[in-house]
Amino acid sequence: MKIWAHRGCSYAYPENTLQAFEAACRYPITGIELDIQLSKDGKIVVIHDEKVDRTTKASGRVLDFTLEELKRLEIESHPDKEGVTQYAQIPTIEEVFELVKPHCLKQGMLINIELKNSVVRYEGMEELILETVNEWGIQDYIIYSSFNQESIKMLKKKESSVKTGILAASASDCLAFSEANPVDALHPCIKNLDVENLGKKTGLPVRAWNIRKYEPFYPDGGEVEMQDLDGLERIGVTDIFTNVPERYL
Ligand code: G3P
Ligand code: CA
């Protein structure tokens, strides 16, 4: 079973921050997963929600902040030795590439970039992320995913060599898309693996993502419900996205 750090090591560190990605790079895992949105001035930022409310101390939509304004927002992190709360920032995609690229080149670390463009469409996001990845010369290490089927189709159309994964709430929805469209992997929710021998049927990797109920995020803590990796493998899952790659290793 291949292990991916979902939003970085997001149980131990604030999700989608450089700290969480840095921690992930210390482990011999397959890759890291992250989410992108666009700022008001069209910069690619790494944050899961369309709003900053849940992960920062501020409030409002990502698209209503410039990059400079987003950089001022505080993400609560681990206290220092004196017990003083420390803060992380929302990273740009370039900052993540700078951190992770050496690990891509050295140990083949992959990066799954999820385009968060189902709620806000973010026109031009596809071109922008393709361009940025090409500038960094890390095309071979990138897998693009999205719940937005049009976006996945568009990425392939713009650059046929890119690797994509279709995200959906169930395995059957992923399968239906893959039967009608070119795609390189299925990314279903771990809760709805409703097709038997999925991998064999498609010949594609099946990367299942976990849910908050089983795996909390920092700083919530609490119980983690570990999955039966052998059982998942038997039904065709090849990879999992997890907030706790350190535990699975
Ligand atoms: O890419 C898998 C997973 O990240 C999709 O769900 O909500 O964590 O972005 P979410
Ligand atoms: Ca995601």
Image (tube, rainbow, N blue to C red):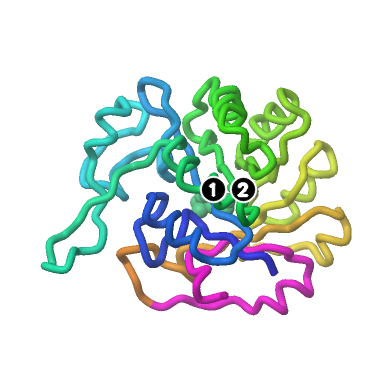
Residue 61, percent from left and from top: 33, 33
Q: How many marks?
A: 2
Task: Find residue 235 and report its image quarter.
Answer: bottom right
Q: Secondary structure at mark 2?
A: helix
Q: Secondary structure at mark 1?
A: helix
**Image quadrant occupied by the N terminus:** bottom right
Please report contact status of discs 1 and 2: CB closer than 8 Å, yes or no.
Answer: yes
- Does 225 appear in magenta? yes
Q: Residue at x 45, y 31 (%)?
A: 44
Is 203 left or right of 10, judged from the image as shown? Answer: right
| Mark 2 Cβ and ligand 1 under 8 Å apart | no
Please give the range of residues in magenta. Answer: 223-249
| Mark 1 Cβ and ligand 2 under 8 Å apart | no
Residue 38, percent from left and from top: 43, 29
**Mark number displayed over residue 102:** 1
Residue 146, percent from left and from top: 61, 41
**Mark number displayed over residue 105:** 2
Is 51 left or right of 171, judged from the image as shown? Answer: left
Around disc 2, counting alpha carbons within 10 Å, would you say few (fewer than 14), some (14 to 19), or many (20 or more)?
few
Is 138 left or right of 79, judged from the image as shown? Answer: right
